[in-house]
C-alpha cells in the first residue's frame, strides 16, 4: 500500500468514535514514518464529484485542526516555538530499516493550507572515529571454550 | 492544540497594521457548545480542546445568540 493509499484509507474511516485530532495527527505521522512521504491535500481525499474540494467532507473539516496539532506536536518535540500558521520541522523516528527523519513543512492559513512530510534516512553513526580517522569497531565475539 | 494566546500573537504578526493581538473571550451557552461536541466530526476537534462553530454545526445558533452574549477583550 502506498503512503497516499494509507492516508486515503485513514480519512475514509472518519469519523472515528472516541478519537480526537491528537489521535489523527499521530496516525498521519505514523503513515509517513512507516510508509513514506505524504502530501496533503490529496487529489482524491475530500474531493467532490466535480473534482472540486468538498468543504463539508471530514477531511476539510479536520484539516486545519490537524495542521495545528502537527505544529504543536512538532514544536514540543523539537523545543521550538509553536506557530499554528506556519512551520518547518524535522522529527526523528524509528523506521523499519533504521532511524528516519520526517521533514515537515506546513501552512495553515485561511489563504491556503497544506502539509508535506518527507521521509529521509537519518544520518547514522556506524563507528566511533578516533584521532587519526580510523574507526573503532567492537571486537568480534570469541569462540567459547 | 496550543493556547488562545499563541493563536492571537501569531495571527497579529500577519496583520501588523491592525493594532496588535487581543483575545476576544465569549461566554457561549453550553447547549450551543454541545451541538459541536455531539457532532461526529466537530466532536473530534472539540475533544482536543478546539471548539469550532461551523455552518450547520452551531454557527447559526451562535450568531443568533451573539448580541446577548457576555464578551471581554483581553489585550496581550
Image: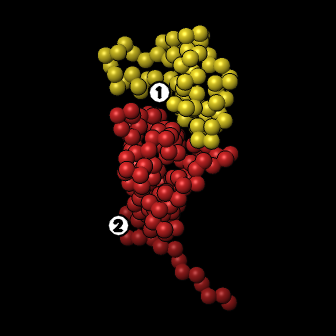
Give the drawing colour for chain B: yellow
The answer to which quarter of the image holds residue B68 is top right
Discs 2 and 1 carry the same chain letter: no
Name the foreground residue: B72 vs B53: B53
**Residue A93 visible to an observer of this rendering:** no
Instruction: Write the residue at 38% across / 54% down.
Output: A43
Instruction: Write the residue at 45% across / 34% down.
Output: A84
**What is the x, y in percent for residue A76?**
52, 40
Tell me which chain appears red.
Answer: A
> Which secondary structure lies at badge 1?
helix
Name the foreground residue: A22 vs B64: B64
Instruction: Write the residue at 56% across / 17% down.
Output: B64
Q: In the image, A104: left or right of A66? A: left
The answer to which quarter of the image holds residue A108 is top left
Whether B56 is drawn above or below A123: the answer is above
> Which secondary structure lies at badge 2?
loop
Whether B37 is drawn above or below A42: the answer is above
Which of discs 2 and 1 lies nearer the camera? The answer is: 1
Read off the chain for label 2.
A
**Residue A44 visible to an observer of this rendering:** yes
Question: Few, some or many C-alpha atoms within 10 Å of disc 2 (few <14, some 14-19, many ≥20)?
Answer: few
Residue B7 numbered mark, or none: 1
Q: Label 2: which residue?
A: A132
**What is the x, y in percent for residue A13?**
58, 54
Residue at the limit of the structure toward the front, as seen here: A50
Quadrant of the drawing holding the C terminus of chain A: bottom right
Instruction: Write the residue at 41% across / 70% down.
Output: A135
Name the foreground residue: A63 vs A126: A63
**What is the x, y in percent for residue B66?**
55, 14
Task: Report the Cα–Cα distance between label 2 and label 1.
Answer: 52 Å
**What is the x, y in percent for residue B25?**
56, 16
Q: In the image, A62: left or right of A119? A: right
Amino acid at each position: 500500500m502506498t503512503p497516499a493509499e494509507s492516508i486515503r484509507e485513514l480519512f475514509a474511516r472518519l469519523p472515528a468514535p472516541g478519537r480526537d485530532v491528537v489521535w489523527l495527527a499521530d496516525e498521519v505521522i505514523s503513515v509517513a514514518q512507516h510508509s513514506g512521504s505524504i502530501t496533503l491535500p490529496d487529489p482524491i481525499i475530500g474531493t467532490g464529484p466535480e473534482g472540486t474540494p468538498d468543504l463539508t467532507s471530514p477531511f476539510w473539516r479536520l484539516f486545519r485542526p490537524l495542521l495545528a496539532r502537527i505544529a504543536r506536536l512538532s514544536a514540543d518535540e523539537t523545543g521550538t516555538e509553536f506557530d499554528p500558521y506556519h512551520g518547518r520541522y524535522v522529527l526523528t523516528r524509528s523506521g523499519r530499516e533504521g532511524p528516519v527523519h520526517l521533514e515537515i513543512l506546513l501552512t495553515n492559513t485561511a489563504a491556503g493550507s497544506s502539509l508535506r512530510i518527507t521521509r529521509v534516512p537519518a544520518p547514522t553513526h556506524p563507528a566511533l572515529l578516533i584521532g587519526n580517522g580510523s574507526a573503532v569497531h567492537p571486537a568480534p565475539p570469541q569462540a567459547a571454550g | 492544540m496550543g493556547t488562545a494566546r499563541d493563536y492571537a500573537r501569531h495571527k497579529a504578526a500577519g496583520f501588523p497594521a491592525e493594532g496588535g493581538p487581543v483575545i476576544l473571550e465569549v461566554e457561549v451557552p453550553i447547549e450551543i457548545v454541545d451541538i459541536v461536541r455531539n457532532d461526529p466530526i466537530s466532536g473530534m476537534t472539540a475533544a482536543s480542546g478546539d471548539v469550532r462553530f461551523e455552518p450547520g454545526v452551531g454557527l447559526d445558533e451562535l450568531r443568533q445568540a451573539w448580541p446577548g452574549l457576555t464578551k471581554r477583550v483581553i489585550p496581550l
